[in-house]
Amino acid sequence: MIKIAICDDEMIIRKQLGSNISHYLSMRKIKFKLYYYKYGNDLLEASNQIDFSFIFLDIDLGNCNGVEIAKKIRKNQVKPINIVFVTNYTEYQTMAISIHTFDYLIKPIVNNKLYSVLDDLMFWYNKEGHKQRERVSFKTIVGIITIYM
């Protein structure tokens, strides 16, 4: 089962993103579970207990920064997690890439772009066996670096 976290301080964005992801995965008959978080620290705590397959993360979370949350998740993760930033801010793109994020979506979210990102995510996730594709991960001082086979 694919476990997907959605973290955004705006409820309407969480619901819209969840609805669109649900539609995409349901149409492909893929088993999934969505987890919703308003606060980055709640996501960070949950990521220590739940093996998320993908995380959709806002950068501006009110009292904390999604990039900092992603860095902490990268530092603590045991199993590699694909992180997609969903934000209004284009200026954080370089910083987001430096922590090996999977993609970067600009709000308002266009379904075609979201579905394209989901296509890419599913390419790297073996949907027949619900197992991750072969990869080697190394823990470094800047976090975990993953090389796909």
Image (cartoon, rainbow, N blue to C red):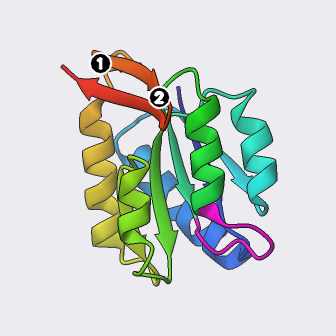
Q: Mark 2 or mark 1, which is nearer the start of the sequence?
A: 2
Q: Neighbour class for label 1 at 10 Å: few (<14), some, many (≥20)? A: few
Q: Are marks 1 and 2 in contact (CB under 8 Å)?
A: yes
Q: Is residue 79 left or right of residue 106?
A: right
Q: Amino acid at mark 1?
A: Arg
Quarter residue 94 falls in = bottom left
Q: Is residue 105 left or right of residue 45?
A: left
Q: Neighbour class for label 2 at 10 Å: few (<14), some, many (≥20)? A: some
- Magenta span includes 129: no
Q: Is residue 37 left or right of residue 22?
A: right
User: Horizontal and vertical percent for residue 117?
Assistant: 31, 56
User: Horizontal and vertical percent for residue 101?
Assistant: 40, 50
User: Horizontal and vertical percent for residue 85?
Assistant: 48, 62
- Whether residue 125 is situated above or below residue 15 in the rendered picture: above
Q: Is residue 107 left or right of residue 61?
A: left
How far apart marks 1 and 2 lie (CA) works out to: 9 Å
- Magenta span includes 63: yes
Say what secondary structure mark 2 lies in. loop
Q: Amino acid at mark 2?
A: Pro
- Whether residue 125 is situated above or below residue 142 in the rendered picture: above
Which residue range is magenta in the image?
Answer: 58-66
- Whether residue 90 is situated above or below residue 111 in the rendered picture: below
Predominant SS along the magenta part: loop
Say what secondary structure mark 1 lies in. strand
Residue in view at x 64 percent, y 75 percent: 60
Which residue was labeled with disc 1?
Answer: 135
Which dot marks residue 145?
none
Which residue was labeled with disc 2?
Answer: 80
